[in-house]
Amino acid sequence: MTEADTSTTGAEGAAAAAAAAEKQRQKDELYALDISDAVWEGAPGTNPDEERVEIAKLPEGAVAMRSSLDKDTVLRYTKAEWDAFVLGARAGEFDLR
């Protein structure tokens, strides 16, 4: 490996570390949000009294998700994470076979 290769690898590593730190900052901010007044929605056609997944839209395109049976356990996703999940679900990545 040449000195130029090491410099490029070091710059790429620093950029990756900065990107990871930014993602962690976003997640920390997302989980610090007070969502006690969030409006939870289930899939169209589902009944609020039945078992279902519910989502709430958060600022900047983020989303919170919970089960209607366990309203205290809430997962939060950044816009990028949610978009990736939706694209994967539409493509069948999460289909149970």
Image (cartoon, rainbow, N blue to C red):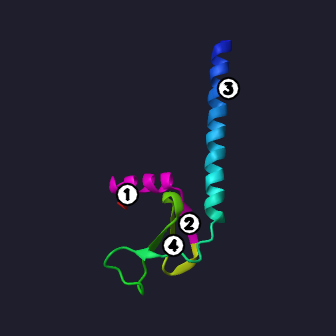
Mark 4 and mark 1: Cα distance apart in space: 17 Å
**First in residue order: circle 4 vs circle 1:** 4
Q: Is residue 87 covered in magenta?
A: yes
Specify whether 23 is left or right of 93: right
Residue at which label 3 appears: 10
Mark 2 and mark 3: Cα distance apart in space: 34 Å
Q: Secondary structure at mark 2?
A: strand
* Position above or below: 3 against 68: above
Residue 42, percent from left and from top:
40, 75
**First in residue order: circle 3 vs circle 4:** 3
**First in residue order: circle 4 vs circle 2:** 4
Specify whether 54 is left or right of 33: left
Q: Residues within 10 Å of mark 4 (few under 14, many from 20)?
A: some
Taking depth in this image into account, of 32 and 70 the one nearest to the observer is: 32
Residue at which label 2 appears: 75
| Residue 45 visible in this rendered orientation of the protein | yes
Residue type of the residue flagged with mark 2? Leu
Residue 59, percent from left and from top:
53, 62
Mark 4 and mark 2: Cα distance apart in space: 6 Å
Instruction: State the mark number for residue 66.
Output: 4
Residue type of the residue flagged with mark 4? Arg
Residue at (48% x, 79% y) in the render: 68
